[in-house]
């Protein structure tokens, strides 16, 4: 990407807004911020953000509902489950007509953001990947025990075929956010339980839990510093049955959406590459691990790591290893 002149970007974007060219303005801002972040030191980038927050362009784009919720942080952090639902719901509803979008600026900006942002595409792809991993578990193990850590609204469960077929033995969902847990509790009513706890409670062994066939965590490792992330990985691995699998995800560094997230949404994640993901399992004895699979989804924003525990799935529960294609 060409270097963007940071002294002119915001005024150029404002001019486009004043001319009513909202889509062009959003594109210019999104790609311009990405270029500036890539060509700045950390300190210069933070100084630029301070300047951005004072500019009229900032207020204009905060009319976009996802950006506004992330920026205002009503639950104390950006990326709460209500905000995540803005992303998940985007391709579930019929797209609004052009006339509808023109008359409602927040609607229009939300639509544009979802079209521009590979980060939003990747979050939806991540959800589909987790759904399909739940299905693969139910295809591998009879009535599996599944644990979701930092579950949010459990959107990946709602979309899973195994969930619809009721082929999950027990589902445990943990989150520190009681409001999120109320939504999750409705979804897993009848075959699961929710536990209000933080990842630190899990690390400190303060949450009594059974052993699981599949444990996953989506959308929280990106908030955890290395030491905590490593301890949580080890602790969750200990909770697996023999042959069980732990599946986690993290945002990759240097993807284009990060600049807009940091500048406009005040949303600062911890990014990890393949080596940094591998470091999370350093404390697990190698002989306890059967297999490690690390891969990146098609938008190249999210990296996944699946760790299989050594040992065989209990023969009375084993179904074979059926591969289910992701959407
Ligand atoms: C980005 S949301 C992800 C929610 C859901 N898993 C998803 O992928 O849509 C982050 C979730 O992590 C939870 N969370 C954040 N920090 C946590 C912590 N230290 N312990 C437990 N849950 C935490 C939040 O309450 C929130 O539900």
Image (tube, helix red, strand yellow):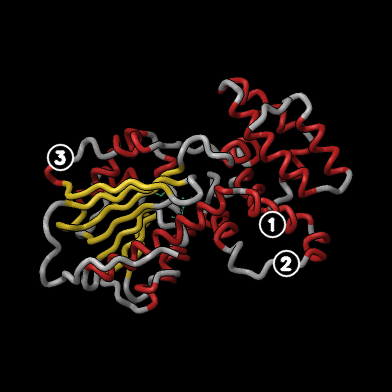
- Residue 201 in the image: state x and y as whole percent: 31, 46
Per the image, label 2 sits on a secondary structure element best described as loop
Q: Nearer the viewer, residue 108 or 197?
A: 108
Task: Check disc 3: other Cα within 10 Å, few if <14, some if 14-19, many if 20+.
Answer: few
Q: Which residue is mark 2?
A: 96
Question: Quadrant of residue 245 in the image?
Answer: bottom left
Question: Quadrant of residue 48 in the image?
Answer: top right
Measure the alpha-carbon separation of dots 1 and 3.
47 Å
- Residue 183 drawn above or below residue 118: below
- Residue 99 in the image: state x and y as whole percent: 82, 65
Q: How many marks?
A: 3
Q: Is mark 1 within 8 Å of ligand 1?
A: no
- Residue 192 in the image: state x and y as whole percent: 32, 69
Lower position in the chain sequence, tag 3 or tag 2: 2
- Residue 239 in the image: state x and y as whole percent: 21, 53
Measure the alpha-carbon separation of dots 1 and 2.
9 Å
Quadrant where the image shows the C terminus:
bottom left
Q: Which residue is mark 3?
A: 285
Q: Which residue is mark 1?
A: 111
- Residue 125 drawn above or below residue 10: below
Task: Check disc 2: other Cα within 10 Å, few if <14, some if 14-19, many if 20+.
Answer: few
- Residue 278 drawn above or below residue 195: above
Per the image, label 3 sits on a secondary structure element best described as loop
Quadrant where the image shows the N terminus:
top right
Residue at 34% in and 76% down: 190
Q: Nearer the viewer, residue 219 or 301?
A: 301
Q: Is mark 2 within 8 Å of ligand 1?
A: no
Task: Give yes or no for contact between labels 1 and 2 (Cβ–Cβ under 8 Å).
Answer: yes
């Amino acid at each position: 990407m060409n270097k963007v002149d940071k002294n002119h970007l915001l005024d150029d974007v404002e001019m486009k807004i004043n001319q009513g060219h909202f889509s062009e303005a959003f594109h210019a801002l999104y790609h311009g911020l990405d270029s500036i972040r890539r060509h700045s030191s950390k300190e210069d980038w933070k100084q630029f953000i301070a300047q951005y927050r004072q500019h009229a362009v900032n207020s204009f784009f905060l009319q976009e509902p996802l950006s506004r919720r992330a920026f205002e942080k009503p639950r104390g952090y950006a990326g709460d489950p209500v905000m995540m639902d803005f992303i998940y719901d985007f391709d579930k509803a019929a797209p609004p007509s052009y006339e509808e979008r023109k008359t409602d600026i927040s609607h229009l900006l939300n639509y544009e953001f979802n079209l521009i942002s590979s980060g939003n595409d990747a979050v939806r792809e991540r959800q589909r990947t987790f759904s399909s991993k739940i299905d693969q578990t139910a295809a591998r193990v009879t009535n599996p025990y599944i644990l979701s850590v930092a579950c949010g609204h459990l959107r990946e469960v709602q979309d899973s075929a195994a969930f619809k077929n009721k082929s999950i033995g027990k589902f445990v969902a943990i989150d520190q956010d009681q409001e999120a847990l109320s939504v999750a509790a409705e979804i897993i009513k009848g075959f699961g339980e929710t536990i209000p706890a933080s990842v630190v409670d899990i690390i400190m062994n303060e949450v009594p839990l059974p052993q699981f066939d599949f444990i996953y965590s989506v959308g929280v490792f990106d908030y955890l510093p290395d030491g905590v992330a490593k301890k949580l990985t080890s602790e969750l691995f200990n909770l697996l049955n023999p042959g069980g699998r732990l599946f986690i995800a993290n945002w990759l560094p240097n993807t284009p959406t990060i600049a807009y997230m940091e500048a406009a949404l005040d949303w600062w994640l911890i990014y990890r590459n393949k080596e940094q993901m591998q470091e999370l399992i350093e404390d697990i004895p190698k002989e306890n691990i059967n297999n490690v699979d690390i891969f990146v989804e098609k938008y190249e924003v999210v990296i996944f790591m699946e760790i299989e525990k050594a040992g065989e799935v209990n023969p009375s529960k084993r179904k074979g290893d059926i591969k289910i294609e992701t959407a």
